[in-house]
Amino acid sequence: MYRRCIELLNEFLTKAEKLSNVGDLDCLISEYYEKLGDTGETPEINTLMDKLCRVTQRLIDLRSDTEAVQKLSELSFEERIELEQVERIIDGNLLCYHFQPIVSAVDGSVFSYEALMRPIGSPLITPFHILKYADLTDRLRDIERATFLNVLGLLDKDPDMFYGRPVFINSIPNITLPKADSDRISALLVKYSDKAVIEMTESGELDEHRYRILKEEYRSNNVRIAIDDYGTGYSNIKNLLDYMPNFVKIDRSLLSEIQNSQKKRHFVRETIDFCHDNGILALAEGVETSEELRAVILLGVDLIQGYYTARPSPEVIESIDEDIAAEIRRCRAELRDGIASKQYVAADGERIMLDALVRDGYSSVLIGKDLPEGARVTVAGTPSNETAISVYASRLFKGTIAIDNVSLLSIREAPCIELLSNSDVTVEIIGENRLNGGGIRVPHDARLNVTGNGALTIKIDNSDYYGIGDDLASKNGEIVFAHDSMLTIDANGQRGVGIGSGMGGGKIIIKSGKYLISQQGGYGVCIGTFADHAELDIHDCDLETKLSTAKGTALGSLYSSTDIHLWRSSYRCFAGGLTMVGIGSPDGDYSKVTIDNANISIDVRGDECTAVGSLNGLSDISVSKASFRVNAGGNNALVFGSRDNKTRLSVVNADVGVELATENESFTSAAKEDMIIQGGRCLFSINGVERSI
């Protein structure tokens, strides 16, 4: 036992002699006290260890003081002024933070933010100066303490300031803080373990024992870890194997001009593959150009940070520039589909020939960049010549895109035509046009106006789909149809919307034109929304919907309330499945449907179904000056409203004919006092027997 203790003391003294940093000595002392404890040491050995600790502490203090004095004496006059300013900043905690978004390499959405230190009131002092002079004066502990407490303090003051996303906090893991500070920081990290990521910024080789303590502490508190500057200095493959962090930030030096360096691409690809094989997210740090962005996405990186995607800002921004997000989506599609992403930028008044773009290797067209308000661009093709080219309306663009005999092919569920944020675009339809595999995306902050006298057919066969609007997790912008010919949407999939989106948003207005919307699958809405209020204004048109799904509604909302005005139009509805509604909502708590001066024919079949209203909620239905025909059938089939909830029904000067086949003996749950029947003619047949109201 004594021999082993003497060996350990000798090891400790040998290592301590080489140290020049008190923090490193603290780690070494902790390590060797633990090792001596495993040997069952005697009080004499403990006393000897205590003396060795005190002696080495004095030697390091003396050495540090000597080196610091020498370095300070060598400072220039300008550097001494900088030192004074840095000491003033540290003493007064005159630090604020700018936040740089870290974005998804899949769709450009903001994944998280990095908190970047900035001095207050000293524009010539940079973070580099602060770290330089803090290291020189042995004040890195003060920086470490301030960084943690300041950023975590912001979280504690306003937990929602980062929109529920994580924030990366820079840490120098070699720094050991006093226990009181460490305990205070640990308590905050436990409280915000789902929002804090510790980014380890290494300035020297990290003591393995020290790192083991940190790693165990962070992991036990469910705090995620990121390794910074990977690929340079001490952040190497050994550390990656030892640490197995949650995130690896690939250093800017490996990404600069990466598109022109095969060696860099090879190293970065190997790093990304290692990360993915071990459940680590790979982050490309310092991306500054479009070419670098495309290169790292094609290599498979998960996250991107850099001036090109978004600069640091004192305000936490919720989303990055939509043009950059769209570029990220295009590059991701290129990685997924193997089709090179080369974008053509249109000029005002230009007529773009798709065949020529294909010959020149382009995969997309951007319309509206730097164009004046009211600009017009025509995209022309041949209906029989299908082209895998996507059309984008630039952010803030206000103008017209004419499509003239185009046949666009989307790969893997992307829209064929996409409006970017805050655009207000008129799509003019000329000739015969086809969109295959994807439709037209209208995000929540954009507006689409459809005009022209040509025809447009959208054909989609995806699991989740939309024809014109946005996906099931998003809101659509306002959509107005004012064209004079046929719009056809033919969709097959598990869940989808013909016109609209999953989460509602802007109004859908139909002013004219002819429509045929056919959908087959599990859950479907022809025009409206899935999960939010649907507001539809449909008039002066010829509309036909064919819906064959397990659950669905032709016009309205699947799970929410509706406000539908159908007037001066002809509408034919065919709907069949398990739970079906013609106009209204299967599960919404309220449906208001107004039909005026229209010719309506509804054929609805289902175990549970109703032609008009809310199947499981309140219904307010008004039919006036209309021809209204319903053929409904099913175990629990109705014509107006639901069986169990209140229904108000007004039929005024209308020609109504109803044929209902059902196990129940009623066409509506409306009480007599809630029904107004005036003028016109109403013929009701239930299970072949004519009934009076």
Image (cartoon, rainbow, N blue to C red):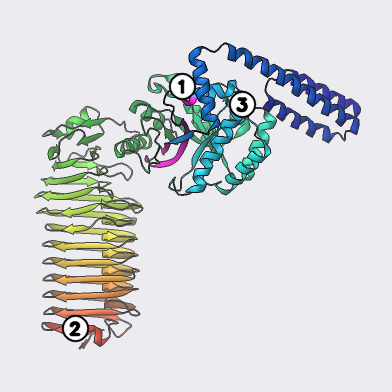
Q: Taking the image as drawn, is residue 9 in sight? A: yes
Q: Amino acid at mark 2?
A: Ile
Secondary structure of the residue carrying tag 3 is helix
Q: Looking at the image, which is closer to me, 232 or 633?
A: 232
Residue 420 percent across, percent down from the top left: 26, 42
Q: Taking the image as drawn, is residue 225 in sight? A: no
The mark lying in front, picked from 2 and 3, is 2
Marks 2 and 1, how far apart in space? 77 Å
Query: Does residue 424 belong to the magenta stretch?
Result: no
Q: Looking at the image, which is closer to me, 265 or 242?
A: 242
Residue linked to disc 2: 676
Q: State which quadrant residue 342 falls in.
A: top left
Residue linked to disc 3: 238
Residue 206 percent across, percent down from the top left: 64, 27
Which residue is found at the position 27% from the left and 54% from the top?
A: 491
The mark lying in front, picked from 3 and 1, is 1
As drawn, the label of residue 501 is none
Against 537, is 69 above or below? above
Residue 14 percent across, percent down from the top left: 78, 19
Magenta region: 100-127
Query: Is 251 left, or right, of 65 in this rendering?
Result: left
Residue linked to disc 1: 253
Which residue is found at the position 83% from the left and 35% from the top?
A: 37
Marks 3 and 1, how far apart in space? 19 Å
Locate the N terminus by quadrant: top right
Secondary structure of the residue carrying tag 1 is helix
